[in-house]
Amino acid sequence: ASSAFTGSSSTGLVRWTYAEIKELTGNFKHQLGPHSYKAMLKDSRPAVVKLLLFPLESRKFRARVSVLGSIYHKHLVKLEGYCCDPGHRFLVYEFLKNGSLDACLKNPKLCKRLTWRRRTAICLGVAKAISYLHTECREFISHGDLTLGNVILDENLEAKVSEFGLGKLDIEASAAERGAEKDVGDFGKLVLALITGHQGNNEDLCEWTYNKWISGYGWRVVDKRIEGDIDFEELERALRIAYWCLQVDERMRPSMGEVVNVLEGTLSVDPPPPPFACQRDLHEEGSMESDLEP
């Protein structure tokens, strides 16, 4: 590989040529997801190569990579290096054995291992990762596209967030605030999907679960595939904070630091108002419940 691009932060990222990227991936033989491929590094470590589709001027791309390469957190996927050849932009990440949370929820064998305790740990880990990006890096970093597909699980089903910091490359202060609010909203959707096991329409899921919860039947929204006991205090905290994260008025949404404290049980949270503009009539819930059950 080419010499490491260290930048001002001495990140030590490796810069690969496009020819080397093709070699590492076996000419993009093993596709893992949209525009991502499995690779094998020279030291026999597996990695993930992500193709970036948006055009980006070389200097800006390298500057952004330098920032992302300086970030280290237990719940963030490590960036190993990049490719910045003319017409080719790739990022190379560490490989995690169990793949995306999205895929795990669809895999009966892996889903069986996603106990209540594991799911709450995943929620907390993701919240800590996003809070770190927002407040503990040398500059504000929004994820920009937090989804089940961007939460990756290692061999112990520990969660790590991937593909962070790619949404905004010339972010201004006002845009940074909007980026934070979007991340918070996306986190609320992720929590509901993880609790229910349902990956369908987010608006319908939000309304259905909220109406069950406000009627005193919050336990009925829990994924029926979860084996073992459910901690109903944790369920209450998770649902409340998810609905606060999903408030239509973004000024009412909590910070990710507050989300972490609520999930850890160190900060109490009031019951939230409906997190959608027009609450569906409760009498319409019958057909929706059958539609939304995983």
Image (cartoon, rainbow, N blue to C red):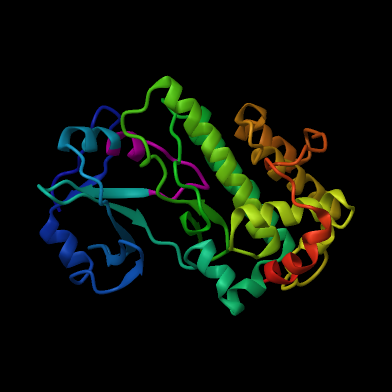
The residue nearer to you, when weighing 262 against 293, is 293
Is residue 235 visible from the viewing direction of this image? no
Position of residue 248 measured from the top left corner of the image (x, y, whole percent): 63, 36
The residue nearer to you, when weighing 179 against 24, is 179
Position of residue 100 measured from the top left corner of the image (x, y, whole percent): 49, 63
Is residue 196 visible from the viewing direction of this image? yes
**Residue extending furthest toward the bottom:** 109
Q: Which residues are magenta?
A: 65-78
- Is 215 left, or right, of 147 in this rendering? right
Residue drawn at (78%, 60%) of the image? 284
- Is 204 left, or right, of 98 in this rendering? right
Q: Quadrant of residue 127?
A: top right
Residue drawn at (65%, 39%) of the image? 245
Q: Is residue 70 magenta?
A: yes
Q: Is residue 273 magenta?
A: no
**Residue extending furthest toward the top:** 173
Note whether 272 is above or below 40 in the view shown: above
- Is 217 left, or right, of 78 in this rendering? right
Q: Quadrant of residue 104?
A: bottom right
The residue nearer to you, when weighing 109 against 238, is 238
Position of residue 39 measured from the top left corner of the image (x, y, whole percent): 28, 66
Residue drawn at (33%, 33%) of the image? 67
Q: Main secondary structure of the magenta part?
A: loop
Q: For the C terminus, give its image quadrant.
A: bottom right
Residue drawn at (9%, 47%) of the image? 86
- Looking at the rendered structure, the number of numbered marks drawn on it comes to 0
Position of residue 94 measured from the top left corner of the image (x, y, whole percent): 37, 56
- Is 93 left, or right, of 105 in this rendering? left
Note whether 112 is above or below 15 in the view shown: below
